[in-house]
Image (cartoon, rainbow, N blue to C red):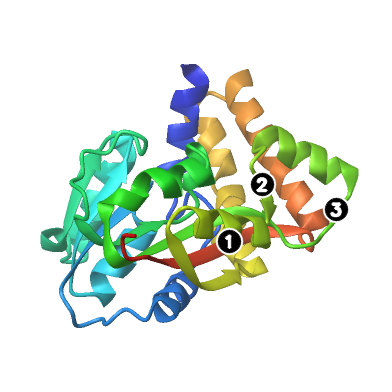
Amino acid sequence: MEEYRLLIDRHKGEKRQGPGGDAESEKALGLAMIDRSARCRIADIGCGTGASTLLLARLLNARITAVDFLPDFLAVLEGRAEDMGLSEKITTLCCSMDNLPFRNEEYDIIWSEGAIYNIGFEKGIRDWHRYLKVGGVLVVSEITWITDSRPPELQRYWQGEYPEIAVASKKIAVLEKNGYSPIGYFVLPEHCWLENYYRPLQRSCQDFLDRNGNSEEARAVVAAENREIELYERYKDYYSYGVYVAKKLERR
């Protein structure tokens, strides 16, 4: 429980809880060929403190349901939405992404950046399929190998952290098997990891330790982060987040 509390404290003050970028989210919108003026309903699943939610609310004529299981993160999102004048477009929902209270074909777009790993890529895209309207768009980012082989140290680390990690062709095959037509894919560039995610964490590290009395548990959280950052800086040519854009097919 203490580690769980520390992880919330560590990340709730950050703009992002994982790699990503506003320009890259806009690129995904472009690949999805979404009409920005058309009214639409969006579920942003695993929204964290709302980096993608707020961007979508600003750019689209949308009603957005922002889903996260951490009320601390949703409270931050609500405060940011109010500051930006976007509260009327966003409804927060505190629940697990594998127990969503949505109706069948309720949404035009399902969006999930850096979060689907919590239940697994295949389970997520399969379970969420019914919530999309026919012809609706799914946009998810997922940790992805970007080479056919990689160093054993890196392989062991990510197989331990997330056994479902795979190359993009396998992820695309999963989409095709589960009722989607892939329409776009790209890899998040280095700045989405370093400038947008890891460097802000490093800058806030001492404040986090101070807030938590420099406890052994807090130092362990930072040590795990530093290990992940070190691996990325050494092996970034072998993996990244892939952004997958797909359309729900007509019922057969």
Give the residue type at disc 1: Ile
Residue at the top extreme of this rendering? 1
Q: What residue did someone put label 3 on?
A: 150
Give the residue type at disc 3: Arg
Position of residue 80 relative to residue 189, above or below, is above
Of residues 38 and 227, the one nearer the viewer is: 38
Of residues 175 and 120, the one nearer the viewer is: 175
Residue at the front extreme of this rendering? 252
Task: Give x and y (percent) for residue 110.
Answer: 33, 58
Does residue 247 show up?
yes
**Residue drawn at the location 64% of the way across and 35% of the way down:** 222
Is residue 96 toward the left or the right of residue 24 in the image?
left
**Residue drawn at the location 32% of the way across and 78% of the way down:** 34
Q: Distance between the Cα atoms at labels 2 and 1? A: 13 Å
Task: Give x and y (percent) for residue 77.
Answer: 28, 51
Mark 3 or mark 1: which comes first in sequence? 3
Mark 2 or mark 1: which comes first in sequence? 2
| Figure quadrant of residue 158 | top right
| Figure quadrant of residue 153 | top right
In this rendering, the label closer to the viewer, 2 or 1: 1
Quadrant location of the C terminus in the rendered image: bottom left
Number of callouts = 3
Task: Give x and y (percent) for residue 50.
Answer: 34, 54
Q: What residue did someone put label 2 on?
A: 165
| Figure quadrant of residue 134 | bottom left
Q: What residue did someone put label 1 on?
A: 172
Q: Distance between the Cα atoms at labels 3 and 1? A: 20 Å
CA neighbours of label 1 inside 10 A, class few (<14), some (14 to 19), many (20+): some
